[in-house]
Amino acid sequence: MEAAVSYVKDGGDLRDTELRLGLPGTEAPEKPAAPSTRGSKRALQEDGDMESRAKSRPLAVDCGEAPAAKTQIVGWPPIRSYRRNSFPPRKVEAEAEAEAAGLYVKVSMDGAPYLRKIDLKVYKGYKELREAIDNMFKCFTQGEVSRKEGCSSGSESAITYEDKDGDLMLVGDVPWEMFISSCRRLRIMKGCEVRCLRTRQYS
Amino acid sequence: MVGGFRWAAMFPDEVWEHVFSFLPADADRNAAALVCRAWYRIERRSRWRVFVGNCYAVEPAAAVRRFPEVRAAAIKGKPHFADFNLVPSDWGGGAEAWVEAMVEGWPHLEELRLKRMVVSDDCLELIARCFKNFKVLSLVSCEGFSTAGLAAIAANCRNLRELDLHENEVEDNCLHWMSHFPESFASLVTLNIACLEERLVGLLHRVPQLVDLGTGKFAAQHHPELFSKLESAIAGCKNLKSLSGFWEAGPTYLPAIYSVCEGLTSLNLSYATIQGPELIKLISWCKNLQRLWVMDLIEDDGLIAVAASCKLLQELRVFPSDPYGAAQPISLTEHGLVAISAGCPMLHSVLYFCRQMTNAALLTVAKNCPNFTCFRLCIMEPHTPDYITRQPLDAGFSAIVESCKHLRRLSLSGLLTDLVFKSIGASANCLEMLSVAFAGDGDAGLHYILSGCKNLRKLEIRDCPFGDKPLLDNAAKLETMRSLWMSSCSVTLGACRQLARKMPLLNVEVINERKRGLPLELQPDNCPVEKLYIYRTVAGPRSDTPSCVWILR
């Protein structure tokens, strides 16, 4: 026996012609599903053509109705496999432009005469970012006393950033993805300001 | 046959050989060979080009023995649907048997073209070592080799004129394989390879006579210096007629090829995710284009522009950028196809992927282009009707076959009933290859095709309600064809057994991947056949079948 066939025509709804109590617009409580015997007379009539159509299209869906979930058919559409894999879903143009442009933010170091700019997209995580920044500003920190000699020298530094709310944040607290989406500029802080920042965090 | 009178002896063999050299097609030479023993002997000794459409149709040694003077050979392996992953990967199509026989019997071979075959590095090394005057290697849709094998070719084939490696699965294990090419490489005219590296640019400077250049994809924004070098290298190739490959490049890099656009007759941008406006700008430079392969990102507007600027266009292929409909819909519809058909009077070959079609559009295309030799339309959602009338597309495709009297290749799609097959069977007298998917109502559809289409060579069918009866009723037809593929249809094992018994010159291959390993002899007659591949052969059953393939006798 074929699966229950919907007798509802495209766009129609038998509920529109249903007789019931209640004002228009109010929903009557759903009736339980009609027992199969009630529709069997019509089922017998329709079955004739439905059966032949269903048999002749073993994998088919009724003409005009798209399947609810789009399941991928093997080998369809008929394209070579490299054409299938090569293209991620097309992005909206603006998004694609932004991706191509990179995520450039200014980096300033306290005491350095000029700023730098880096593309945050290029780095995979905080470690790489720190290394890159160290490299970039190496020339400005050479003259300073090393950390071992004491913390009252100006050698302590911390990388901070300004987020999209304008707040000064310490780099490293939030997950990387969240960081690069909210970071507007970077600032390398030096000396006592760093200690103040650190104390503030724990108060 | 003129018995007894030895009129062939009226002229020396060389005269007949000279006469045969004017026969353009293999079919004509085959016919001449059947006339008498003398002509058979003379023809076989003078045939230097051989085409084997199915590598299993004849034993390699037999082919080599019959035609001892062959200089150019072309061999095809797997069925076409292997391109779409419908054929098990271990099905067969290995090239070793052929290469070994050729090395033995055709030491002067100059040209080898293989399609859909499994070619190992050992094969490539054999070719490189044994054919001293090797000039042309073309591997299309092949697999099984790596860049190490290509290095052997590059190092040993000093007279190489053409290296065409498009659409292969190549393992990249030998960096800089192209460095094995000779320093002075005056012979190379065609280079179509799947990679772009520094050495290619260097090579290009050494082959200014290059006519056909194909490269793989590369992202230009990561190689800006490389790209500008490429630009000057390409500009130096003044004879360049055909360009393919490239680009995930952004539109800023396209001007690199503007300098050669006017000379181009063939342009393949089907890997390039360039948007419509940039495509239009590029193509407007290519006034002499005869062949254009492009992504559907060109959209209807782009095709209208092509119709306006490329009046010499003969072949158009439009590929889907987004086959699974995940992104925003693209405005490529039946209008683009109609525009091209109206604007390009020399158009004869079309491959078009789209999402909607109407009978009216197809009727217009049929009227505009009665000279089509190849028409392949793929409406991506199966069973899609005419989106305006909601009718099947029978009328549209019927118009195509009735109008295009020289149609040799046809691919159907959309909602189709048996009626379209009736038209095809009756009208498509030149049709050699037909591809059918998700179409038809029942057995009658297949019967119309097999009882009509007198020149049909290849028939490939998937997901259609065709069963045993039309196959058995038209068994003799199958021996006049190269091959038949049927998958996800309604054929049973019993019918295949009958067919195999009735037709000893056919290999009836039953492919049941789900039941791999279970002996076919124990399956009942009503067991459904998942995939069926039938081909004529004089070689008998092949010996290299995997566990999912049974050849019925």
Image: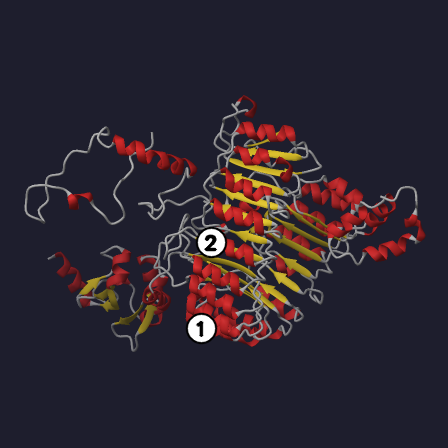
Q: Which mark is residue B252?
A: 1
Above or below, comparing residue B180 to residue B122 in the picture: below
SS for tag 2? helix
Tell us which disc is closer to us: 2 or 1.
2
Q: Residue at x 50, y 68 (%)?
A: B342
Can residue A162 be seen here? The reply is yes
Q: Disc 2 or 1, which lies upstream in sequence?
A: 1
Q: Judge the density around disc 2: few (<14), some (14-19), many (≥20) Cα neighbours within 10 Å.
A: some
- Which quadrant of the rendered structure holds the C terminus of chain B? top right
Q: Amino acid at mark 2?
A: Ala
Badge 2: chain ID: B
Q: Residue at x 49, y 30 (%)?
A: B528
SS for tag 1? helix
Q: Position of residue B325 (x, y in %)?
A: 37, 54
Can residue B553 be seen here? The reply is no
Report whether B293 appears left or right of A122: right
Report whether A112 appears left or right of B231: left
Q: Judge the density around disc 1: few (<14), some (14-19), many (≥20) Cα neighbours within 10 Å.
A: few
Badge 1: chain ID: B
- Which quadrant of the rendered structure holds the N terminus of chain B? top right
Q: Which mark is residue B395?
A: 2
Which of the pair B129/A33 is nearer the observer? A33
Q: Amino acid at mark 1?
A: Thr
Q: Position of residue B155 (x, y in %)?
A: 69, 56
Which of the pair B274/B525 is nearer the observer? B525
Q: Position of residue B210 (x, y in %)?
A: 65, 68
Are the residues under marks 2 and 1 on the same chain?
yes
The reply to whether the C-beta atoms of the residues labelled 2 and 1 are less than 8 Å apart is no
Above or below, comparing residue B489 to residue B72 in the picture: above
Q: How many marks?
A: 2
